[in-house]
Image (cartoon, grey):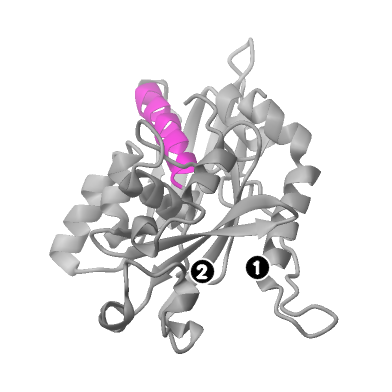
Amino acid sequence: MDQVSWDQVLKMLEGTKLGDRVYEGKDKTLIGEVLWHDGEPHLKLMSVRDESAWISIYRPDAESINDLETGNSALLETSIISFLAFGNVLGMIQGSRSAPSAGAVAEWINGLGLVSGKVETQALISEESARKLRQSSEAARIETRVHTSRAEALERHGSRLSGIMRTIRQEYGPMTVTIILQASRAKASSEGRHMLKEEAFKLSEATDDDTVESAKAKLIYLDADEEATTEEVNFVKQKITAKRKIATKSADGNPIRNQSAVEAILAVADEHDEELRRITRY
């Protein structure tokens, strides 16, 4: 998609009523608030944990979530998102595993109609991992672990495994499933190995927003003499991620967790700036 001026999108939301920033989705309610840090707008995206409690306090005409009697933070799960100035890239820190994911950011943007067209998110895997997948000739084996509730998400990524997950859910109920597909090394199985490579592409994209819990592929490389070598790639471990300590209080004891999260995101973005620009061609 064309580059979006995310700063302008966020500034447009500044000063709007709470009701203009709440999206009530099929299975979650998402609330966005503009978070300012060093004069730049960032996004605090929250999801509601207890819908009945939320309904009892929600006022669309409120100026901010802080104007509601939320009692304590247990009502909301929070993620902090920073949009980089290039490539439609966002960086985020989830406050917990159940806090809004990158997919929820897209759902919120689309639900509120903040930009023209439909926004989708996908993880940026490292250049090395992406290069290995592109340069491989085939895949001998793929392995993924995914919950049956993610069948629809898998389908959106174009994965052929979505139908398998639906069947398992219908027959056995909700559960986490590990799927391993391994092709024969025989020449006659070349088409199957090519299909596994295509599925590896889909699974690498599905590592975003927790669609799959793990995704690995054993890639095959053929040289000019048709001699084969193999290498395993783990798409989850090779996403562009980083661990950072987030300060919850400043030296004077004031809460700064959100600002600290923004600083951590921007620090990681700066650290990976050259690689991110190459991946996004900016």
Per the picture, the main secondary structure of the magenta-coloured stretch is helix
- Taking the spot 62% from the left edge, 28% from the top edge, the residue there is 280
Residue at point 78%, 52% (across, down): 267
Front residue of this view, candidates 49 and 148: 49
Q: Residues within 10 Å of mark 1 (few under 14, many from 20)?
A: many
- Which residue is pictured at 70% across the width and 54% down the height? 265
List x then y, in percent, for residue 245. 75, 70
Residue 170 forms part of the magenta stretch: no
Q: Which residue lies furthest to the top in this view?
A: 224
Magenta-colored span: 189-206
Task: Pick whichever, 5 or 183, lies toward us.
Answer: 5
CA neighbours of label 2 inside 10 A, class few (<14), some (14 to 19), many (20+) = many
Relative vertical location of residue 196 with respect to residue 281 in this rendering, above or below: below
Specify whether 220 is left or right of 55.
right
Q: What's the residue type where badge 1 is placed?
A: Asn
Q: Which of marks 2 and 1 is nearer the N terminus?
A: 2
Q: What kind of residue is marked 2?
A: Thr
The residue that disc 2 covers is 78
- From the top left corner, tell me how far across and down residue 205 is, in percent: 47, 40
Residue beneath the point at 63% across and 11% down: 225
Name the residue that disc number 1 marks: 258
Is the Cβ of the residue at disc 2 closer than 8 Å to that at disc 1? yes
Quarter of the image for residue 173 reads: bottom left
Numbered disc 2: secondary structure: strand
Q: Distance between the residues labelled 2 and 1?
A: 10 Å
Q: Where is residue 43 in the image (x, y as percent from the top left)?
A: 55, 56
Q: Does 215 sit left or right of 266 as displayed?
A: left
